[in-house]
Image (cartoon, rainbow, N blue to C red):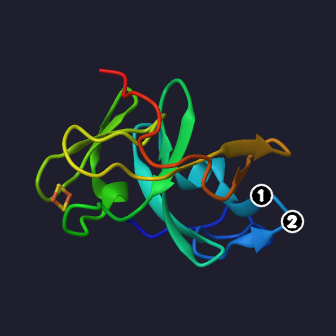
Amino acid sequence: MSDLTPASSAAPSLTQAHRVDSAMTLVGRVDDVPLGEGREVIADGRRIALFHTPTAWYAIDAICPHRGGPLADGIVCDHIVICPLHDRHFDLATGAASGGEPVMIHPVAIRDGDHIYVSPPANTPGSRDAHS
Ligand code: FES
């Protein structure tokens, strides 16, 4: 993973989450996550994998429930991330897994032009069907 440099000295880095209201936490800027990639952030003490896809931003719990793989380092294709350790597929929109335990998803919002916010978990993992 590359070093992340904020766009300005006032910008938060992806490791410096800032809570701005009761629901969402500022975790970085749009430029921190290149299109088609993921980055791990910390929000409220929780490790979250944030993904920038051509169609949407997604956030899921960062640790693969299989054996702890770093999901932010996985390959992203459409709305699917592939765990880099044993190739399980996780739907970024639902948290559903191709086999085994799903992951929690988190709402993502872009505010003030380029600030990325995430919320606490939005679902019971895998509560909706995965897209395939
Ligand atoms: S640790 Fe992710 S599939 Fe095994």
Q: Residue at x 56, y 46 (%)?
A: 123
**Which of the image's four quarters has the C terminus?**
top left
Of residue 63 and residue 126, the one placed in the foreground of this image is 126
Q: What label sits on residue 20 in the rendered view?
A: 2
Mark 1 crowdedness (10 Å alpha carbons): few <14, some 14-19, many ≥20: many
For disc 1, the marked residue is 24
Q: Amino acid at mark 1?
A: Met
Q: Residue at x 81, y 44 (%)?
A: 111
Q: Position of residue 128 (x, y in %)?
A: 46, 31
Q: Residue at x 53, y 42 (%)?
A: 58
Residue 99 sits in quarter:
top left
Q: Amino acid at mark 2?
A: Val
Residue 63 sits in quarter:
bottom left
In space, the residues marked 2 and 1 are separated at their CA atoms by 7 Å
Is the distance from the Cβ of mark 2 to the nearest ligand 1 atom less than 8 Å? no
Q: Residue at x 46, y 36 (%)?
A: 94
Q: Are marks 2 and 1 in contact (CB under 8 Å)?
A: yes
Looking at the image, is 127 positioned above or below residue 130? below
Q: Position of residue 13 (x, y in %)?
A: 63, 70
Looking at the image, is 125 positioned above or below residue 68? above
Report ligand 1 position as a quadrant: bottom left
Mark 2 crowdedness (10 Å alpha carbons): few <14, some 14-19, many ≥20: few
